[in-house]
């Protein structure tokens, strides 16, 4: 039996029994600007409201895969807690009407329709972004067996870039909320391409390369616009990337993460040495993976004692930690210093795998 998982120092799992993801629907959470002008690509304010970027909160109970609806929820833009009026629109100073809280957004998860919380972008974000990338974070609680349980903060990056023209973005979507519940089940990933903010319908001249981002390194997969993923392909969690090429060059990449809830064990990733999910000057984060029973959540550290780690920096390039010889190595845990984070361009992506 093999378990796969991953971490970043932005959104880390710490063993909660709740699996959470943020899914962007409508338009990608990307906005570009023409320097020195008020031209934004795409212009969120001219899009139909249901086409604007919508960050959808999807929570499942790891033990049985059931969809959970929060009984309390908070949204933050960067570190600012968003406040909302009775009409659902944000009321923060300088951000009035920029965001809309949707308490019962209709979305499809696993072939069924659910009413879940979501946050919709209502205005152009460039003017409040400082002209660099920002982050939307969601936290809250769910009720399980009569108890209110907090779920880990979930986050999604807001990409803000200067426009150079003819720029592409990729959004990957599937028909089951990126989650497989029973053995033998499958889902279909589909690539959507946006050029300068507008979705294209003619895919002539584009080629596709799906990549499994595994603990032992990347593995090329299918080459169609769609990619089937079954439980046989997923060891607990599978990180996917699709590189889209035009005229032989990569123009954009899209990402997704598929969870297999039929596996009897799942991977818990524990993080110590830091508060929250950022490594600050003088701090060292320790990442420790451990196997746990899906039925009870009981940790079984003896099941897998040596794990394979594979690290990449903030630019997606293989990264070698201080004291290591390669970017891929085996260990019981890994320590990441602030100095390592600086060398990694302030961001680090890790993949983990282990075999029992």
Image (cartoon, rainbow, N blue to C red):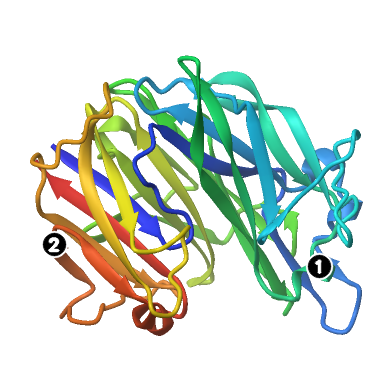
Residue 201 in sight in this render: no
Q: Which image quadrant for residue 135? A: bottom right
Q: Residue at x 85, y 37 (%)?
A: 88
Q: Nearer the viewer, residue 331 or 187?
A: 331
The image quarter in which residue 167 lies: bottom right
Left or right: 239 as drawn, with respect to 287: right
Task: Please state if 284 lies on the left or on the right of 187 as rendered.
Answer: left
Q: CA distance from mark 1 to mark 2?
A: 43 Å
Give the image location of residue 256, x and y in percent: 47, 48
For disc 2, the marked residue is 331
Residue 211 position in % (x across, y down): 36, 55
Q: In the drawing, does residue 225 fall left or right of residue 213? A: right
Query: Percent x, y for residue 17?
Result: 38, 32
Q: Earlier in the sequence, mark 1 or mark 2?
A: 1
The label on residue 128 is: 1
Check disc 1: other Cα within 10 Å, few if <14, some if 14-19, many if 20+: few
Q: Residue at x 28, y 29 (%)?
A: 297
Q: Secondary structure at mark 1?
A: helix
Q: Point out residue 89 in the picture as x, y percentages from the top left corner.
A: 87, 43
The image's mark for residue 219 is none
């Amino acid at each position: 039996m093999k378990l796969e998982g991953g971490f970043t120092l932005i959104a880390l799992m710490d063993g909660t029994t709740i699996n959470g993801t943020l899914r962007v629907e409508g338009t990608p959470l990307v906005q570009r600007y023409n320097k020195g002008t008020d031209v934004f690509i795409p212009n969120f304010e001219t899009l139909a409201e249901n086409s604007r970027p919508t960050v959808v909160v999807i929570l499942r109970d790891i033990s049985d895969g059931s969809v959970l609806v929060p009984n309390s929820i908070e949204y933050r833009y960067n570190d600012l807690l968003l406040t909302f009026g009775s009409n659902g629109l944000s009321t923060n100073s300088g951000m009035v009407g920029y965001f809309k809280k949707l308490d019962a957004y209709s979305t499809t998860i696993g072939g069924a329709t659910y009413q879940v919380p979501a946050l919709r972008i209502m205005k152009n974000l460039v003017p409040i972004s400082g002209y660099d990338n920002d982050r939307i974070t969601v936290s809250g609680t769910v009720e399980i067996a009569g108890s209110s349980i907090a779920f880990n903060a979930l986050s999604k990056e807001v990409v803000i870039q200067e426009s150079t023209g003819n720029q592409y973005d990729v959004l990957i979507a599937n028909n089951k909320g990126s989650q497989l519940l029973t053995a033998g089940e499958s889902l279909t990933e589909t690539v959507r391409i946006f050029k300068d903010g507008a979705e294209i319908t003619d895919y002539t001249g584009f080629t596709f390369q799906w990549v499994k981002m595994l603990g032992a390194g990347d593995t090329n997969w299918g080459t169609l616009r769609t990619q089937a993923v079954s439980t046989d392909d997923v060891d607990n969690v599978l990180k996917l990337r699709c590189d889209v090429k035009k005229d032989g060059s990569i123009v954009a990449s899209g990402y997704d993460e598929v969870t297999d809830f039929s596996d009897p064990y799942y991977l818990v990733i524990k993080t110590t040495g830091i508060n929250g999910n950022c490594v600050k000057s003088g701090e060292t984060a320790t990442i420790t993976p451990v196997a746990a029973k899906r039925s009870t959540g009981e940790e079984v550290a003896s099941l897998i004692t040596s794990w394979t780690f594979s690290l990449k920096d903030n630019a997606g390039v293989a990264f070698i930690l201080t004291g290591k010889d390669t970017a891929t190595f085996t260990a019981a845990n890994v320590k990441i210093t602030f100095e390592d984070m600086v060398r990694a361009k302030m961001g680090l992506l890790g993949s983990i795998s282990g075999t029992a």
